Image (tube, rainbow, N blue to C red):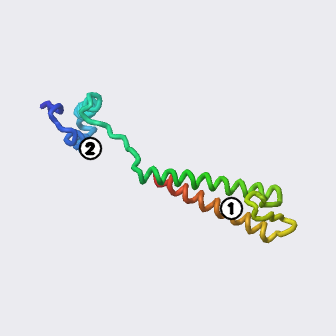
């Protein structure tokens, strides 16, 4: 007995595809797959692409800015370590390793902490996707 899959709805075809015994009825499986592909090609079944909502778009922008800040903080800490001094950029003072080691290491640790925190925040967003 031949089954006419052309009269089935999309939901019925998908249900048949999930529940069919693939080993026992390979020809029926092929017919179901062909009907689904044919309907997609003809536009009977629209393939919906996921569009980001405003909230998701805002979260993406925040994640990118967090990643950018993480890189900036890490770069500032690295240049401070390589030169042996941090400061003068924001006119808040110059902390050198020789003159004020506590303040120097405090600023370096603060920059690395900010960097790790911002990287974690951005990574958390990108991994949940």
**Visible residue check, residue 26:** no
Q: Extreme right residue here?
A: 98
* Residue drawn at (64%, 59%) of the image: 115
Disc 1 vs disc 2: Cβ atoms closer than 8 Å?
no
Left or right, 97 with respect to 11, comes to: right
Quadrant of the rendering where the N terminus is positioned: top left
Quadrant location of residue 66? bottom right
The circle on residue 16 is none
Image: 125 above or below 94 = above
In the image, 31 versus 8, the foreground residue is: 8
In the image, 10 versus 99, the foreground residue is: 99
| Residue marked by disc 2 | 18
| Residue marked by disc 1 | 112
Left or right, 97 with respect to 112, comes to: right
Left or right, 114 with respect to 53, comes to: right
Front label number (1 vs 2): 1
Left or right, 19 with respect to 59, comes to: left
> Where residue 60 appears, x then y in whole percent?
49, 51
In the image, 93 versus 16, the foreground residue is: 93
* Residue drawn at (51%, 51%) of the image: 61
* Residue drawn at (59%, 53%) of the image: 67
Q: How many angstroms separate mark 1 from mark 2 (CA)?
A: 52 Å
> Where residue 87 appears, x then y in whole percent?
77, 61
Quadrant location of residue 35? top left
Q: Extreme left residue here?
A: 1
**Earlier residue among tags 1 and 2:** 2
> Where residue 18 appears, x then y in whole percent?
26, 44
Q: Extreme bottom residue here?
A: 102
Image: 114 above or below 43 = below
Image: 15 above or below 1 = below
**Visible residue check, residue 84:** yes
């Amino acid at each position: 007995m031949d089954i006419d899959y052309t009269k089935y709805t999309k939901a019925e075809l998908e249900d048949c595809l999930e529940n069919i015994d693939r080993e026992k009825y390979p020809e029926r499986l092929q017919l179901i797959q062909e009907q689904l592909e044919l309907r997609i090609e003809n536009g009977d079944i629209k393939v919906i692409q996921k569009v980001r909502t405003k909230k998701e778009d805002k979260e993406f922008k925040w994640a990118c800015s967090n990643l950018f800040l993480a890189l900036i903080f890490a770069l500032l800490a690295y240049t401070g370590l390589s030169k042996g001094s941090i400061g003068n950029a924001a006119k808040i003072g110059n902390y050198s390793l020789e003159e004020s080691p506590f303040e120097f290491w405090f600023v370096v640790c603060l920059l690395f902490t900010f960097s790790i925190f911002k990287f974690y925040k951005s990574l958390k967003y990108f991994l949940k996707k």
